[in-house]
Image (tube, rainbow, N blue to C red):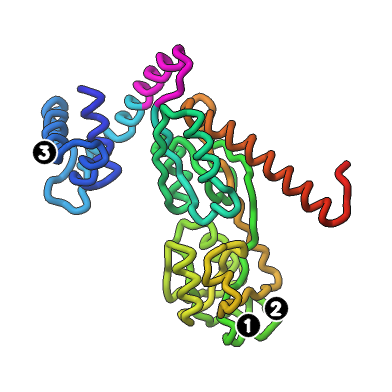
Amino acid sequence: MELRQLRHFIALAEERSVTAAARRELIVQSGLSNSLQSLERELGTELYIRGTRPVRLTATGEALVGPAREALRAAETARRAVQETRDVLVGRLRLGIALSAQYLVPFAAYLGEFLRDHPGVDVRMRGTAALDMLDMVENGELDCAIGPALEQRGRLRLTSLASEPLALTCRSDHELARRDHVTVADLDGERFVDVPPGWTARLLCDALFAGAGITRRIVAEAGDWEVLLEMIAAGAGIGFTPVGLQYKVLTDPDTPLRHVQVDGAQLDRHLYLILPPHAETSPAAAAFATGMLAQHSSERDGNHLIQARDEGYRPS
């Protein structure tokens, strides 16, 4: 059994497509298929069901996923141990990203500095729902992530980076927009546009309405905040959105959107740097985290100083 075969198998298990797995591994589709067939012959069993879309693993294939990942992680640890003796950081950083958080946590700038300092590292970014991102860091599919979370998760290390409130957003000609504030009960029967299940904002809103005993009608879901705001602007419904989003539909002087205060609804989205336990953190992830946190802390302290001076105060 070769590590190359296990890597090809994990690519298939995660991509659920022979074509996508081959593209990810930078080989032709027939080469990946031959590698998988060779692995199946060695194990004496089929690992996936041919002809299904997306590809479905057999029971033995599902059982192999965990051990295969462990074997690849062990091989990567051994490779890194050799590289570290040469004092050169190389390899790959798989980073989960909440793309809408760029204005709160400028990760593009952090990544740019990291890549300049470590030209031997390649970065692969992936944007996905908050719960999926946590799962992927926990099971080793991602090396680290910058994104929202509601609470501590298992053995993961969460470092707070920023937070922002969610506000009820609606068109200025909506009846609710004519009020200075509303209650959760006032929202009963309204049509909502929301992000998909698994997103932090969706979890917060679902909990709010469940606590109030209100069944909410969600008429549309959008996995992109800009699209969601455009749908609210088009009159599809109302929704809760982060107040600091910088999309034109919200920041334009002639925007048709308005934020409305909801009494008793304290919905805050918290952003974290998410890392696995120390023993499972790759050198690339550790170096990125160290540099990013130092830069983020410096920028945050600088912003506080500027704000204090603007308000006429002097730092102690």
Q: Which mark is residue 181?
A: 2
Q: Amino acid at mark 1?
A: Ala
Residue 165, image quadrant? bottom right
Q: Position of residue 23 (x, y in %)?
A: 23, 42
- At x 57%, y 69%, the residue is 240
- Say how many tags the image has: 3
Q: Magenta segment: does it hold 83? A: yes
Question: Which residue has dot 3 on it?
Answer: 30
Name, please, the residue furthest toward the front: 116
Position of residue 231 measured from the top left corner of the image (x, y, whole percent): 46, 75
Q: Earlier in the sequence, mark 3 or mark 1?
A: 3
Does the stretch in magenta take in 207?
Answer: no
Label 2: element kind: strand
Segment tinted magenta in the rendering: 73-90
Q: 76 and 52: which one is in front? A: 76
Between label 2 and label 1, give the one nearer the viewer. Answer: 1
Q: Residues within 10 Å of mark 2 (few under 14, many from 20)?
A: some
Locate residue 185 relative to residue 23 in the image: left or right. Answer: right
Residue that numbered label 1 is attached to: 177
Proximity of marks 2 and 1: CB atoms separated by less than 8 Å: no
**Amino acid type at mark 3:** Ser
User: Distance between the Cα atoms at labels 3 and 2?
Assistant: 62 Å
Structural distance between the alpha carbons of marks 2 and 1: 9 Å
